[in-house]
Amino acid sequence: MKVLIGTTNPSKVERFKSLLSDCNLTFYTLKDLKITEEPEEKGRTPEENAILKAKFYGQYFDRVICNDAGLYLDGLDLDDPRQPGLHVRTPGGTRRLDDEGMIAYYSNLIHSLGGKVLAYYLEGIAVYHKGRISSFMENRDEVQTSMFYMIDRPSAKRQPGWPLDSISLDRETLTYFVGDENDGDFSGENIILGEYRQRLVNFLKDALGLTEEKP
């Protein structure tokens, strides 16, 4: 079975490959198909934007996986202009930031908030499967166990496509998502471990028809 992952972010591609590693799937990316067009993301939530993307890229492939995510700082009101929300790469209406620009911007923001804040992602996933759209997103209460700290002291390590892993810490172990020399093996993928990860895998398999037919 062939599946298009509707992103140019290499970390997102590897993540979905990992989530569905036990399935007999061949993955393609926008780069593989030389797709440069992008949908206009007018959604109010990560789930709505993921649906818009899945519908758009569904014109190219029978099965498409798309996602979008919003970053939320727990100490800020949702309508606070400093709240990243859906505009993680363009916070406060700024120009689109590259990875290093994001690390610098958010390090300064966290510093202004005391140097350490509790944060969480809300992620929307949408799957286009032969004309049908399925979507998945949990709410703030459901991601309580996935909350983490963001701090104003970046790690020297980088995760391409996920720059904020360099200023994000596991809430229990206080280790960077990207890992440091003495931190052991740790990565941003840990934010979707456990029950959430399994619910996401179950959703993807069902939406792609993997529970109904053999690949």
Image (cartoon, rainbow, N blue to C red):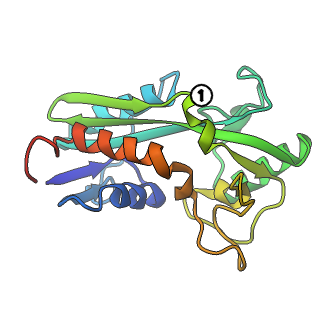
- Quarter placement of the C terminus: bottom left
Residue 205 pos. (x, y %): 24, 44
Answer few, some or many: residues within 10 Å of disc 1's Cα (few below 14, many 20 plus, some between 14 and 19).
few
Please indicate whether residue 111 sits to the left or right of residue 158 in the image: right
Front one among 72 and 205: 205
Q: Position of residue 92 (x, y in %)?
A: 73, 32
Dividing the picture into quarters, in which one does residue 62 lie? top left
Q: Residue at x 69, y 61 (%)?
A: 166
Q: Which residue is nearer to you in this view: 120 or 39?
A: 120
Kind of residue indicated by mark 1: Asp
The residue positioned 28% from the left and 30% from the top of the image is: 134
Question: Where residue 90 sits in the image (x, y, percent)?
Answer: 65, 39
Q: Nearer the viewer, residue 89 or 170?
A: 170
Residue drawn at 64 percent across, 39 percent down: 120
Q: Specify whether 109 is left or right of 94.
A: right
- Quickly name the residue at label 1: 141
Tell me if 187 is positioned left or right of 130 in this view: right
* Residue drawn at the location 60% of the way across and 44% of the way down: 146
Above-or-below relation of 39 to 166: above
